[in-house]
Image (cartoon, rainbow, N blue to C red):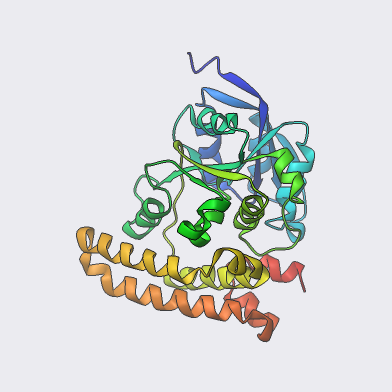
Amino acid sequence: MSLSAPTTLSDVAVMVPTYQGGQDWLQWIDHYQRLRYRPAEVLVIDSGSHDGTAEAAQAAGFTVQHIDSRDFNHGATRQQGADCLQRYPFVVYLTQDAWFADPEALWHLRQTFNDPSVGAAYGRQLPRPGAGVLGAHARLFNYPATSRRQSRASIPQQGIKASFMSNSFAAYRQSALREIGGFPAQIILGEDAWVGGRLVLAGHDIAYCAEAQVFHSHDYTLWQEMSRYFDIGVFHQQAAWLKREFGAAEGEGARFVRSEWAYLWQHQAWRLPEAAARTVLKYIGYRLGQSYQRLPQSLCQRLSMHRRFWSSNA
């Protein structure tokens, strides 16, 4: 089929929250335009960009809504998107820096819902071309080449991984999303894991579709790593029920560290001391995040990667 005549997936909509997308967003649009299967609608909710992000979205034919940057929230903004797109049975969420890697990526993700037991699905994230070894390993660890299922029955085996989702490339059955009450209203991050956990506990399956692929990876600095894990610690306090129902995240963290060090030994062994330092900083950040309620809000904001959360929740 010609790329100039894409097929429309009439029951699928895409939602992307944007803010100062820059070249990443222009690349997103370019990769979108190569899709062989496109959604019926793309909704962009822009949080006050002033770099042409919203204008580029409009020029691409997307629906654009504007909100103040202070009103953005990882959960509430995505729920706003779901509410606006409720006429579509399936909604796909992407971030502005996750580029489609395959012209049939959306089609593959949509096919998982042919099984009525599937309430949500997420695709594979490939390291961006030129990604650093640490960023590449994180994607290879969390997004393997083999598809899998997560369900209530898999909790004893998968633990916290049974609730794993992605906020960068994931789809939801709207009826299942409404059944569990949608996305949480005020959350620092982890809205995907929150909803994934609720879906699994409600009896829905989560499908990981390795055939649906995007390019998405990060090369964090040491401080960014600590800040990110501070936020993860905050999230695990906000969603303490995840630990009760699925088990602690520390076991999965230890498995990641062993995998990362083995990967570095094979590829860039000289970075093992840096990896050890990152592991220590991640742990410190995570433990501080878990204790955020005992810390001054000004310190929380300084430690956090998502500083706007603390301004809007003052």
Residue 277 position (above or below residue 75) = below
Q: Position of residue 226 (x, y in %)?
A: 49, 73
Most foreground residue, 57 or 38:
38
Most foreground residue, 258 or 126:
258
Residue at 62% from the left image edge and 51% from the top image edge: 200
Residue at 44% from the left image edge and 77% from the top image edge: 281
Viewport quadrant of the C terminus: bottom right
Most foreground residue, 9 or 121:
121
Most foreground residue, 244 or 30:
244
Q: Is residue 290 left or right of residue 265?
A: right
Q: Position of residue 84 (x, y in %)?
A: 79, 39
Q: How many marks?
A: 0
Q: Is residue 159 left or right of residue 13?
A: left
Q: Position of residue 240 (x, y in %)?
A: 64, 70
Residue at 27% from the left image edge and 70% from the top image edge: 272
Q: Position of residue 189 (x, y in %)?
A: 62, 61
Residue at 53% from the left image edge and 16% from the top image edge: 4
